[in-house]
Image: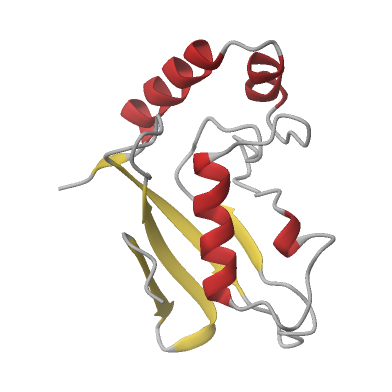
Amino acid sequence: ETIINTYFFSRENDLMYWDGEIVGPDETPYEGFVFKIEIIVSPQYPILPPSVKFVTPIFHPNVNFFTGEVCIDVIKDNWTPAWTLHAVCRAIISILCDPNPNSPLNCDAGNILRCGDKKGFNNMARMYSLEYASKYK
């Protein structure tokens, strides 16, 4: 199964380092923007999960704005060797569509959503996307 609008390439033919781009999903504040992602696979993969981070700053409760660290169950508590990099990409798209304010790495984004201010969150996320992300062609 192909994931629409995700592009990943191994860095200099080294399968341990992957650079990629994710196009923000439709009907989200990230729609129409491209976010750079980095995936690092350890020699113990698939026993250990890959390290995933956003290179492009993004306003999202499950992404640390400063480090790009991503908080998703697939690469944290729920990792199993059955998961693939494809599954990790799907999980990233999923959190862009449905942020989890109860597991925040960005407390400001999490607090806005927990207060029920979806419009405020969307406006902030869109503003940061305009500032830092590339426009999708």
Q: How many labels does the image show?
A: 0
- Figure quadrant of residue 47: bottom right
Q: Which residue lies furthest to the right in this view?
A: 77
Where is residue 76 shown, x and y percent of the image? 79, 60
Where is residue 99 shown, x and y percent of the image? 61, 36
For image coordinates 77% across by 86% down, the residue present is 44
Q: Is residue 82 left or right of residue 60?
A: right
103 over 48 or under it: above or below:
above
51 over 127 or under it: above or below:
below
Q: In this view, does 137 lie to the left or right of 107?
A: left
Quarter of the image that includes the N terminus: bottom left
Q: Residue furthest left?
A: 137
For image coordinates 68% across by 30% down, the residue present is 106
For image coordinates 71% across by 48% down, the residue present is 71
- Figure quadrant of residue 29: top left
- Figure quadrant of residue 81: bottom right
For image coordinates 72% across by 24% down, the residue present is 107
